[in-house]
Amino acid sequence: MTQAHRPLEGLRVIDLTRALAGPYATLLLAGLGAEVIKVEDPDGGDLARENSPYVGRDGVTVERLHDDDISISHLARARGKRGISLNFKAEGARKVFQDLCSRADIVVENFAAGTADRLGVGYTAAKAARPDIIYCSLSGFGADRPDGKAMDVIIQALSGAMYTSGEPGAPPVRMGIPVADMLAPVFGVIGILAALEQRHRTGEGQHIDVSMLGALTSFVAIENWSALAAAGMPSRTGLTVQRLSPFGVFECSDGYVAVVAVHEKLARGLFRAMGRPELSADPRYAGRDVRVANAVPLEAEITAWSKQHTVAAVVAALQAEGVPVAPVRHPEEALVDPRVVERNETMPLAHPAYPSTVDLRSVGVPITFSAARTGFDAVLPVHIGEHNQQVLGGLLGYDDAKIAALAVEGAI
């Protein structure tokens, strides 16, 4: 039986992105089978190339010790992509971009607002080369809003997300994963796939515009914060969600567990596991609304019990009663869970030349198809312009003299 194809095979993506938000979008497209050509500035390349830590002949290090050490960030985000170098300040590079677009289906960029047009590689330029091209812009605030530079922590701050976690009165909490940098590209890929479907029907391409602030704020808006305030319910409750009590994270003698017991059957199961079945008849806890109204004393009762027992004991007791429960794990443990490893939802990383004694893992494509597969081609732009000859000569048909002339001009 032949191995299934990947869903986006046959599509070509011109990747003008850098850092995380854009490269994650094109990483997903690569994992779904698209051919991705990553374009970097010859002067320094992708910002992620300089992100610590690095991996190389001395293993994992905080500083780059050798020229062939590779940033783990770059190793993760550039998988499955061919890399070329173009200096868009040179006229020859802009002509190369036009030629690439004429042979491509999709362009993705995450320059600051207005920069792509200023460099001559915006939607107008791409559409001139291929009228039905799909062009996706990922930015902090919108492709037409030059409101300053946007990094993940800036967007977390502006979106209100930092005040959705933590204890009342405590400082804001920065989420430990770059959630804004990851959400925007997911919406970008959704937009690209929707635009592809529309192009199948109409023959027309279009410009897709996704902002990091809009993506994250839309997630914050899933809760109605004004309604919580009007009802006198706290918006920040630390490790628990009091409007669903009992729901959240509770301390044990050797760690923490997550518990969900929002409905009557689950709440009664929790009380039995605690050895306190009489709590089901307590007027403060005998129904869902009264449990929410008395969330603070209820959570104190649960914590007093859980702190006397190990994580394993609490998990076993709650599982025996059919109450949803899980240990709170460290990311290193979570990334090697057999359930995500077997589905390639996390994948191993390796320096192309040096084996590592550290089990490096990164993101896969967390989608399973019944008649297709996902995965990354065995290609990586280790050096800036790694595949110049392959792309310019092989794909675009440039001869050696033309490529040499581009180098003399400073275009590559």
Image: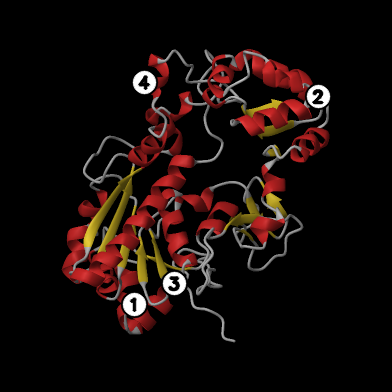
- Tag 3: amino acid: Pro
Element assignment for label 3: loop
The residue indicated by pointer 4 is: 226
Could you give the CA–CA distance between mark 1 and mark 4, rounded to whole angstroms?
60 Å
Q: Position of residue 267 (x, y in %)?
A: 66, 28
Callout 3–callout 4 Cβ contact below 8 Å: no
Asked if residue 59 can be seen in this view, the reply is: yes
- Tag 1: amino acid: Ile
Element assignment for label 4: helix
**Foreground: 356 or 258?**
258
Element assignment for label 2: loop
* First along the sequence among labels 3 and 4: 3
* First along the sequence among labels 3 and 1: 3
Residue found 37% across the figure and 51% down from its top:
187
Element assignment for label 1: helix
* First along the sequence among labels 3 and 2: 3
Could you give the CA–CA distance between mark 3 and mark 4, rounded to whole angstroms?
42 Å
Residue placed furthest toward the bottom: 1
* First along the sequence among labels 1 and 2: 2
Q: Position of residue 184 (x, y in %)?
A: 39, 47
Q: Which mark is residue 275?
A: 2
Q: Position of residue 213 (x, y in %)?
A: 35, 37
The residue indicated by pointer 3 is: 7
The residue indicated by pointer 1 is: 403
Q: Quadrant of residue 295?
A: top right
- Tag 4: amino acid: Ser
